[in-house]
Structures are given as C-alpha cells and as structure tokens.
Image (tube, rainbow, N blue to C red):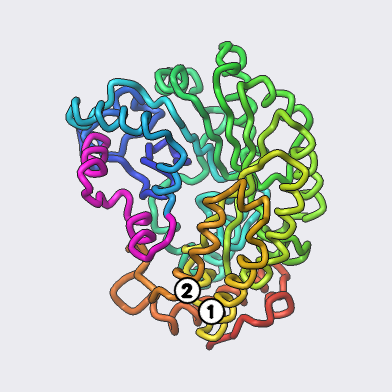
Amino acid sequence: MNNGDYRACCHSEPGIPSDKNLAVPVNFIKDPVKEVWNNNYYRQLRLDLINGVQNPTCSKCWQMESNGEFSFRQKSISNISEERYNSFVDDAVKNNGALSTMPDKLLQIKIGNLCNLKCIMCNQASSSLIQKEVDDWKKHGEKLPTWLQWIDDWEIDWTGFDESTDLENLYQNLKDALLNVEELQFVGGEPLVNPMVPILLENLINENAADRIKIYFITNLTKLTDKMVNSLLQFKTVTISTSWDHVNPEKFRFIRYPASYEQFRNNIDKLLANEKINPVVSFTVNIFNIFDIEQIIDEFEKISQTRNRYIINMQYVENPTYFSIRYLEPEQKKQVIDLIEKYLEKTKNYKVWLDNPSFYEMIKSIKQMLETPNVVDFRGKYILNDNNTSFDFVVKERTRVLQMYDKIRGTNYKTLFPFIKDYE
C-alpha cells in the first residue's frame, strides 16, 4: 500500500496483521518480506483456499463468482499452469500453509498517490489531485461523495514515499523477494510522474538485477519520456498497462479528467510501435462508456490487426457504486443486454476475442451482471444497514456527486451523457 502496509492482492482489504500484535499491520518499511510471507495470516489464507473455505480476504471475488461473473481470482488461476498450481498446493499442504520459496511470481509496490489526473471513479488513495478536491470540499463544509468519505475514514497516509525514505532499509526488507520474483509491478498514483520510480529502477539496474526482472507499470500513460523508456528497456521484459475507457476525446477527458486524448493516443501508438514493450489495455466498464462499447471494442479490434497479440483486461466499476452499470434504469439495462448480444454475434470472428478469451467472457458476463439484483458492497465499510445500496439512495447520490464534480471541474455531464437521469 501507499504507506508500506502489505496486502494480499489489489482487490483485498489493506492491513495484514502481525503475528506479534494483531492490531498492528505488517509494513515493508519495518518488516522483511521473508518474515511476512509465511506468517499466520498468509498460511491460513492458503489453507482456506485449498480447502474451499471462503476466506474474507477474497470477499470481492466470492461475491462476483456468486453472481456468475468472471472474477479476478478466476482470471489469475487461468494464467498459471496446472503443474505450477499443483506444486504450490502440495508445498502449502506439506508445510501447514507455509511455502518453501519466497514470492516468485509477482511483487506489486504502490508508491504513493502522486498523480496528474483525477479520474471520475478514482479516490484520494490513488490521486493527490482528488485529495486536493476533498480538502477544498471539507474547507467549505460540503458533504463528501460517499466513495471518497469511505477512503477518508481510513487512517492511512496515502501520500506514500518520498526522497527522504530510507531506501537502503527498504531494499533490505524486500531483497529476498526482489532476488526471487519474476515480475515487479509499480502502481500509483501515477508511476510516470512519481520521482521515486526512476530511483527504484536505477537501483535495480545498478545491482545488476534488471536483466532477470519483468517490469509491469500500471499507468494513465499521459506522461511518457524517452529517458524512462530507455531505462525500462534494460529489464528482462516491460509491460505497460494503461486505462483506456473511451475513444471519444471529450468523454475520455471527463472519465480521466483532465487527460488529453490526443496525448494519450500518441503515447499508445508509441508503445504499439515498440516491439520490446508489451502494451496492456485496461478497459473499465461504467455508466459513461457502456452505451459506446461497440465503438470502443471496434477500435481495439483495429489495433489487434496490427500486432500479433496484445492483452486487454476488463473490469467493472463496482465502487463507487453510483457509477456502476448495475444502477442503470431497468429499461436501459435491457437496451445494454440487447446491444451486447447483437454485438457479440456480429463480431464472433474478431481477432481481439481470439487473442483475449477472458475479455470475451467478461463482455459476455455483462448480461448476467445486469440481471443480478444489486448487492451490498463487499467492503461493508461505508455501506451500513440503512439501505445505502438501494436503487433510490445510489442514484440520488450519483446526481449529487456529478453536480459536485461539474462545479469543481467545470464539466457538464448532462451534455456528454444525456441518458443519465437526475434524481433529487
């Protein structure tokens, strides 16, 4: 996490309890990864997963799967060989939940919330600019959007690391994982504007570790320098995952405010032209792009014709709930289901589907998602037992929040998305 707290995965709740003090989360600034990796929390999590026990750590995936949706857990399992999967299971069973090796697949470092954008579905944990908006609303005594209030309630320093951080101590604590891991992910905030990222990369290069580590960036890709590209190319492989939620410049800017679509597209084209960099498109389905999904996927298909293969990952906006397609009008849900069914039939021979079968399954699951009754938010933090997930509550909150964003950002959601019905 931003403050160094360990976390099982990016979909789980922050805060892994220490064996020494359950009230204190383990943190990689003070707790070496070799001590955390096989602590009681991780051992129990592995044993529960092996024995079919739905550990609450994985609540989001259990909820999605119970709704017939394709979860992050299922996608992760599909990306690992059966032989490797079974070797982990056998190792964990033999050692009462412990693994005899350090993390050898993936280590993700969230390096703070410094960011140059304030995306409509994001929050202050990942954007310093959203934090400024929150501070401004607080200053004027305004009620925060529900999603941002939930984040604000966490007593976590979202700003993360800076140049005063003791890098040597940090490296020592992560060393056992860095020497063993296949892939290192950087998540923000925005890694391409955070001054810590080039420092971390330079240290890995100087330690002669770069040629055996795969680098994975999750970025909005509005900032990409030749110097950064040259540093990244010294690593074993480089994958850059970027959010691409619309092909209409004005709607793109609204969703990823205040991003320039032209600048973003130029950087996408730069990546596509570099065979040494693996581009990954992260497509987030929400109320602002669901009715334009044909145009968006058609653009993805055009790109697929120019490359052997590139990956497309898809997820839904589940939080904030008011931007989820679950809260479209009933007749709009029927329109979307009809649109998706006709589109999939028309595009069944698309190369983008052949290259990305999980993307196809996610698109297909939209029907199931929209036909499933709305459910309580998996976090259970700000969703209390007061009907806060009822349709009436959520759509009223959506109207209030969109009006707040328009006022502070100078946008106009009614012009761009006239189908969104206002509720007072």
Q: Which residue is mark 2?
A: 370
Q: SS of the residue at dot 2?
A: helix
- Cα separation, mark 1 vs mark 2, equals 6 Å
Who is closer to the viewer here, 348 or 153? 348
In the displayed structure, would residue 250 be above or below residue 210?
below
Question: Would you call the spot at circle 2 few (<14 residues within 10 Å), some (14-19), or many (20 or more)?
Answer: many
Q: Which residue is mark 1?
A: 333
> Residue 246 magenta-drawn?
no
Residue drawn at x 44%, y 29% as measured from the top left: 105
Q: Are marks 1 and 2 in contact (CB under 8 Å)?
A: yes
Q: Quadrant of residue 299?
A: bottom right
The image position of residue 182, as x and y in percent, is 49, 25
Residue at left offset 82%, top offset 53%: 262
Residue sitting at x 61%, y 30%: 197
Please name the residue shown 45% across and 47% down the image: 75
Q: Name the foreground residue: 103 vs 334.
A: 334
Magenta segment main secondary structure: helix
Report the front residue among 412 and 30: 412
Q: Amino acid at mark 1?
A: Lys
| Quadrant, the N terminus | top left
- Label at residue 289: none
Does residue 10 sit above or below 363 in this rendering?
above
Q: Amino acid at mark 2?
A: Leu
- Whether residue 68 appears in magenta in the rendering, the answer is yes
